[in-house]
Image (cartoon, grey):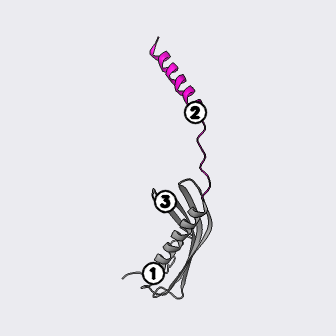
Amino acid sequence: MSAGSILLVGLALAFASTACQPPAEEAGPLSEEDLAAIEASLESFAQAIRAWLEPFPPIEYEGTVVEIDGRGDLAFVRGNYSETYTVEGAPEPIHHAGKYVKIWRRQPDGSWLIAVEIWNSDLPLAEEGAETYMPRSS
C-alpha cells in the first residue's frame, strides 16, 4: 500500500469516528443567579468609578444596561454610558456619551469576571485644526 493510500484510509477513519460521536450538549441560558451576580458586579463597578471620580472636579457618571445574555460560562453585557464634567478653561461643562460591550467569564468559584471590554464614544471626530476642550500646555 502506498503512503498516499495509507493517508487516505487514516483520514477516512478519523472522519468516520467523529461522525459517530453524539452531538455536543448545548449550554443553557444564564440562570437567575448568574444574572443577579453579573448585575451586582456591574453595580459594584459603577460605585467604584464614582468613588474614583470623587476627588476630581464635579463629574456625573451614569451607566445603563441594555442587554445581558450568555450561555454556559460566557456572558455579555451591552450598554450605554454618559458623563458630564467641568474642565478648567472650558466655556461650559463637557458631556460625553458612548456604548460598551463587556464579555464575562464564570470563574471556578462561580463568580463572574470581565474577560474583554470595549467602549466607543458617540462624539464625532474633531476636524483637523479644531479646538478641543482639553487645555494645551505651554
Q: Which contiguous range is marked in magenta?
A: 1-30
Q: Position of residue 57 (x, y in %)?
A: 46, 87
Q: Which residue is mark 2?
A: 21
Separation of disc 1 and disc 2 at Cα? Answer: 53 Å
Q: Amino acid at mark 3?
A: Gly
Of the numbered discs in the image, which one, if any, rests on residue 51?
Answer: 1
First along the sequence among labels 2 and 3: 2
Looking at the picture, tell me which residue is in the foreground, 96 or 25.
25
First along the sequence among labels 1 and 2: 2
Separation of disc 3 and disc 1 at Cα? Answer: 27 Å
Q: Position of residue 24 (x, y in %)?
A: 58, 41
Looking at the picture, tell me which residue is in the foreground, 17 or 3.
17
Q: Position of residue 86 (x, y in %)?
A: 50, 86
Label pair 2/3, CB-CB below 8 angstroms: no
Q: Which residue is mark 3?
A: 110
Separation of disc 2 and disc 3 at Cα? Answer: 30 Å
- Which residue of the protein is positioned furthest toward the top in this rendering? 1
First along the sequence among labels 3 and 1: 1
Residue at screen point 59% across, 30% down: 19
Up/down of 23 relative to 84, above or below: above
Looking at the picture, tell me which residue is in the foreground, 29 or 120.
29
> What crowding class fits label 3: few (fewer than 14 Cα within 10 Å), some (14-19), or many (20 or more)?
few
